[in-house]
Image: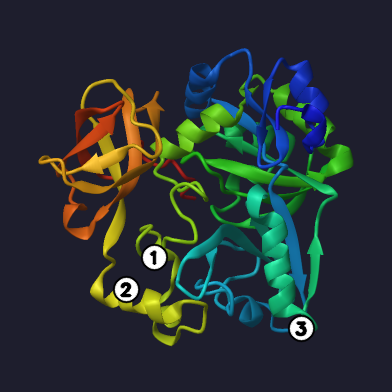
Amino acid sequence: MSDDSALLTTPLDALHRELGAKMVPFAGYAMPVQYPLGVLGEHLHTRAGAGLFDVSHMGQITIEGDNVATLLESLVPGDIQGLGLGRTRYSVFTNDQGGILDDLMISKLAEDKLFLVVNAACKDADFAHLSRALSGKAKLSQLDDRALLALQGPQAATVMARLAPGAETQGFMSIREYPIADIPCLVTRSGYTGEDGYEISVANVDAEKLARTLLAQPEVKPIGLGARDSLRLEAGLCLYGSDIDTTTTPVEGRIAWIIGKRRREQGGFPGAAIIQKQLTEGAPRLRVGIKPVGRAPARAHTEITDVDGTPLGEITSGGFGPSADGPVAMGYVPRGFAVPGMPVKLIVRGKALEAHVALLPFVPHSYYKG
């Protein structure tokens, strides 16, 4: 996909190029991997100030109709019936084997309307999946006319208070509709960095104006995919297709906290029997943090062995953590090895490097607690 003409673009494509972004193919889109500041600078700026990310490649979907929460619960293990008005919940689509088809954010806009944000590479498959299951029972809309921006970092609320007074007190994992600098927006207080922040859905026609308004604030700099990946890795957050996929269950991925008590007991979602059994008896393998000893990073697909060289699993995400000041990684090991401090070896370019199982996240979360 080296030919840019074969790639889709977001409404901010011209702005990225104007700002000097290095563009790369990602999920079928031309996306900024970094700006002149560089991945390290962008990462550290987001941890200290406020970073603006273009996540318009992701899918935005609404579901409308009677009993939409009950209908969606036939596809996800989350408690959607218990989701309050104006609240947001993280969940996953599961398959009949308990594997994860995609992870997503679900928000309740009205008693009869849900708003979903799904991953870019899965959005067409997700919409088809929803259409098959909910055909004739609910109205589905894929919002291709809307962009999505993420403002992340400890100064994100300061910026929002200046442009949309009152936004600074919006609750974590809540959704509200309000103007930012007179531009109508749908705003969730959430994000993918471990920092406080907002994800902002805005009409395509207003996206560049909003981005320029945010970037004009002294606390804000543009951030690319490179820093987005290192930030979420330090925060211990899963990347779909790497850390979780159709071969991993929520229990194995250590995101079983998304399954509330009622759903654990009643089931009623794809793969429920397998997931319920793992909840009771434990999963055979688990996602863990891995901390290499020394400075050499271990990338995805690096083999993990025990100290005697017996294969255990592999790294699913790995790299250098600027805020952690060293290499960090995640991967899967048998349940008996999922113990913080457990020594393991990583096979990097044919050499066995020392590492140990570590607690996640590598950098503490700083979500809004108000």
The earlier-in-sequence mark between 2 and 1 is 1
- Residue beneath the point at 52% across and 50% down: 240
Q: Secondary structure at mark 1?
A: helix
Amino acid type shown at disc 2: Leu
Instruction: Measuring from the top left, give residue 204's x and y in whole percent.
Output: 85, 42
From this view, report whether residue 257 is shown above or below residue 170: below
Q: Secondary structure at mark 2?
A: helix
The earlier-in-sequence mark between 3 and 2 is 3
Q: Please state if 311 lies on the left or on the right of 331 as rendered.
A: left
Q: Residue 160 or 42: which is nearer the viewer?
A: 42
Q: Secondary structure at mark 3?
A: loop
From this view, report whether residue 71 is shown above or below residue 24: below
Q: Which quadrant would residue 4 be assigned to in this image?
A: top right
Q: Are marks 2 and 1 in contact (CB under 8 Å)?
A: yes
Circle 2 Cα neighbour tier, 10 Å, few/some/many (<14 / 14–19 / ≥20): some
Q: Are marks 3 and 2 in contact (CB under 8 Å)?
A: no
From this view, report whether residue 116 is shown above or below residue 287: below
Q: Please state if 248 lies on the left or on the right of 43 as rendered.
A: left
Residue for badge 3? 137
Amino acid type shown at disc 1: Ala
- Residue beneath the point at 58% across and 77% down: 73
- Residue beneath the point at 67% across and 40% down: 55
Q: Label 3 vs label 2: CA separation?
A: 31 Å
Amino acid type shown at disc 3: Lys
Instruction: Measuring from the top left, give residue 138's x and y in whole percent.
Output: 77, 78
Q: Please state if 306 lies on the left or on the right of 299 as rendered.
A: left
Instruction: Measuring from the top left, give residue 166's x and y in whole percent.
Output: 67, 45
Residue 279: give its label. 2
Residue for badge 1? 256
Q: Label 3 vs label 1: CA separation?
A: 29 Å
